[in-house]
Image (cartoon, rainbow, N blue to C red):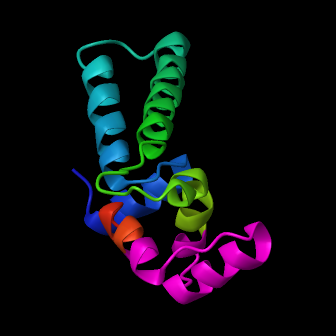
Amino acid sequence: MFTQKKKEYYSKILGFKTIEDFEEFSKRYLKYLENQTLTKNRIMTGFFILIEIQKEALKNKNLINFENIKNPFIKKYSDTILDLRKKGLGSLYIKNYLYENHRVNVSRGTIEKFYKQNNL
């Protein structure tokens, strides 16, 4: 239906985190509008579908994989670690950041293992 570049563009405009969320929205909205006359109410319902899919995406984002991680500090500061990694910072910087700001010693290897498990 759309090229990959268009999907990325529309996904960004509509506020989706992934292209899959945009594809799900477009399929659901197309199915909803199929064989119906267009009215204001039917078009507005598309916005409710959009909001519902965005909420589902937020729920899925909050799922963090703690498999084989026993360090309690990794669990406590998981959001901070993942945010720093998304900014492109390395494990040594994250290790030093946790020590300077929270007085927590966590090894580089444990941090690397954690963000690799969470596909970052």
Q: Is residue 90 visible?
A: no
Image coordinates for residue 107, horizontal then vertical, percent = 49, 79
Q: Is residue 5 visible?
A: yes
Q: Is 99 within the magenta?
A: yes
Vertical position of residue 62 compared to residue 89: above or below: above
Image coordinates for residue 35, horizontal then vertical, percent = 23, 15
Residue toward you, 120 or 23: 120
Can you tell which quarter of the image residue 10 is in? bottom left
Q: Main secondary structure of the magenta part?
A: helix
Residue drawn at (40%, 55%) of the image = 70
Can you tell which quarter of the image residue 57 is in? top left
Image coordinates for residue 114, horizontal then vertical, percent = 39, 66
Instruction: Work out which quarter of the rendered image holds the C terminus and state it.
Output: bottom left
Vertical position of residue 109 compared to residue 15: above or below: below
Can you tell which quarter of the image residue 99 is in? bottom right
Task: Name the side, left or right, on which 40 lies relative to 65.
Answer: right
Residue drawn at (47%, 48%) of the image = 16
Q: Is 20 within the magenta?
A: no
Tally of marks: 0
Residue drawn at (74%, 71%) of the image = 103
Residue toward you, 16 or 94: 94
Vertical position of residue 112 compared to residue 39: above or below: below
Residue drawn at (38%, 54%) of the image = 18
Vertical position of residue 56 compared to residue 17: above or below: above
Report the magenta residues as a range. 84-112
Residue toward you, 94 or 3: 94
Image coordinates for residue 61, horizontal then vertical, percent = 45, 45
